[in-house]
Amino acid sequence: MRTYAGGVNKSQPAPPQAAAAGVVSVAAGVVAGELAAAFVSPALSPMTGVGSAVIDAVPPAVKDWAVAVFGTADKLALLVGMGLVMAAMAGLAGLVEWRRRFAGAAVIAVFGVVGLAAVLGRAQATVNAVVLPLLAAGTGILVLHWLMSRLRDWKKTGAEAERDAPERDVPEGSAPERGVPERPAPERPAAGRRRFLQALGGGAVGAAAGGVLAAALRGAAAGVSEFRSRLALPSAASPAPPLPAGAELELGGISPLVTPNRDFYRIDTALTVPAVDPDTWVLKVTGMVERDIELDFATLLSKPMTERHVTIACVSNEVGGNLIGNALWLGWPVRELLAMAGPQSGADMVLSRSTDGWTAGTPLEVLTDGRDALLAVGMNGEPLPLEHGFPVRLVVPGLYGYVSATKWLTELKVTRFADDAGYWTPRGWSERGPIKMSSRIDVPRAGRPVRAGTVAFGGVAWAQHTGIGKVELRVNRGDWQAAELAPGISRDTWYQWQLPLALTPGQYEIQVRATDLNGARQIEDRARVAPDGATGFHTIRVDVTP
Ligand SMILES: Nc1nc2c(c(=O)[nH]1)N[C@H]1C(S)=C(S)[C@@H](COP(=O)(O)O)O[C@H]1N2
Ligand SMILES: [Mo]
């Protein structure tokens, strides 16, 4: 009887292999999410997000019970419990997918939504936090689709083989007709089975290997994070002056004067955030120096520390872009370390190197001219976050990050521009990278309509190590109007500005420009970010509605 020609018999119960396919698929998805989190930032782990959400949601009585029963293994118990629930759901996903295509995918999508809800509920919800649960669910669905098609092929060929077997019976003695090619035999069930099991095994081994890698990466980062959270920073011998009154404008939507660490832009080439153990960390000063120096972390912390606000920026920051941030840095002036080493005459560059081999070439002059170029250990009152260079990084007022701000710092080689080049220089970026003066409109947000009347404009302007003297706006290329400029923290930081404008309904083009304390004006001509930083006026279009 051919009741299911070529297909799968839906009335048959789903084979147990379908459940196995579901479990392997979900495992692959979870591992994809965890691995991506381990690379991008452990704080984004979807599993941790869900686990934390469970902990938050559980009533205190249940928490007490869990601690009483499992003691310090309560977190482990939670993870094991989550694993069991997920495995059961995953098996179910496989079984229902067998019955109805996409039904299992829908179950996996529910995992994704739960993960999403968990990460969105946490304080540090960023774009990446949203991407990871989606990546995990997408991977799970793809793997499920792949395994189920192998499983269907196997079960189908099994069915076909049975069905076709009598037809292919050739009467004994009669040789196949010459010249007529034999009909290709349907794949034997054994081959289909082998192919499915290979796929299942491959998926399982891949997920396990990825899981081990993710766990190793997280383990290393966790050890260093633990050290970091216990670390007490020394107080500053030279504390930052208090913020001048009025430096922070009261204008909703403007960038905060000091950028919180969790909002601080992050740029680097590191695929995984380096986990540098401060106990074994040393900073070497080498090259054209009278004395090589090795400085360990405890010695660095014992030095008289300077604390300063410095606004650092990325050369890839577009006009109006957000690859810029202002933080309170704590560190030992790098000029003091260089003075101990004694640079030789002829040296004009310091090639700083990170633990992962990245380098920046900074003019020796800039590091020794008295500005607050720091071997920084603190950022906004905390040890450096791992992403921002823990335990030690360079912060140099006035230079783009790619020629100065080496994170996970491990070596300073005193050398010459003629002999050495930082990482980005041979890749099409300038040897020297002073930050170009620029200004930005933060409010109103570009593209967001505003009500007619008095419209508050505000933003930031920067000309590091020179300082901003004036910020002006113009409407539809009319006359420049001076904005209120808040007192800057120092010439090494950005300044806030604001200007209320009376606008009637219509469409407007608003532009901003800055002038520095030497009277030099921001460059109007547009330049791209490569090779040494963008120029041009930040220009926004504003729709004013009645
Ligand atoms: N080790 C290392 N340090 C680095 C980089 C890098 O790729 N690797 N990028 C630099 C660049 S281009 C910039 S703009 C700043 C950014 O610092 P942040 O991520 O703390 O904002 O770090 C600099 N330090
Ligand atoms: Mo950068």
Image (spheres, grey):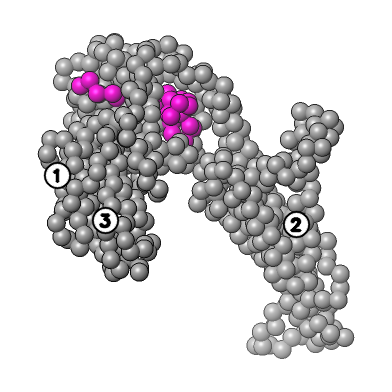
Left of 94 or right of it: where is 114? left
Q: Mark 3 points at which residue?
A: 501
Mark 3 Cβ and ligand 1 under 8 Å apart: no
Helix, strand or loop status at disc 1: loop
Q: Name the residue under label 2.
A: 90
In this view, the residue in front, 73 or 453, is 453
Q: Nearer the viewer, mark 1 or mark 2?
A: 1
Q: Tag 2 or tag 3, which sits nearer the N-term?
A: 2
Q: Mark 1 points at which residue?
A: 521
Q: Give the range drawn in magenta.
A: 368-395
Helix, strand or loop status at disc 3: strand
Q: Which residue is drawn at 64% across and 57% down?
A: 112
Q: Which residue is drawn at 28% across and 44% down?
A: 497
Spatial distance from mark 3 to mark 2, Cα to Cα?
Answer: 58 Å
Q: Which residue is drawn at 38% across and 32% down?
A: 327
Visible residue check, residue 226 = yes
In this view, the residue in front, 259 or 190, is 259
Q: What residue type is labelled 2?
A: Ala
Q: In this view, does 425 lie above or below 503?
A: above
In this view, the residue in front, 525 or 272, is 525
Left of 439 or right of it: where is 159? right
Q: Residue at x 82, y 37 (%)?
A: 61
- Most extreme residue toward the left is 519
Q: Which amino acid does label 3 sit on?
A: Leu
Spatial distance from mark 1 to mark 2, Cα to Cα?
Answer: 62 Å
Left of 241 or right of it: where is 79? right
Quadrant position of the N terminus in the picture: bottom right
Q: Does the magenta stretch include residue 199?
A: no
Spatial distance from mark 3 to mark 1, Cα to Cα?
Answer: 23 Å
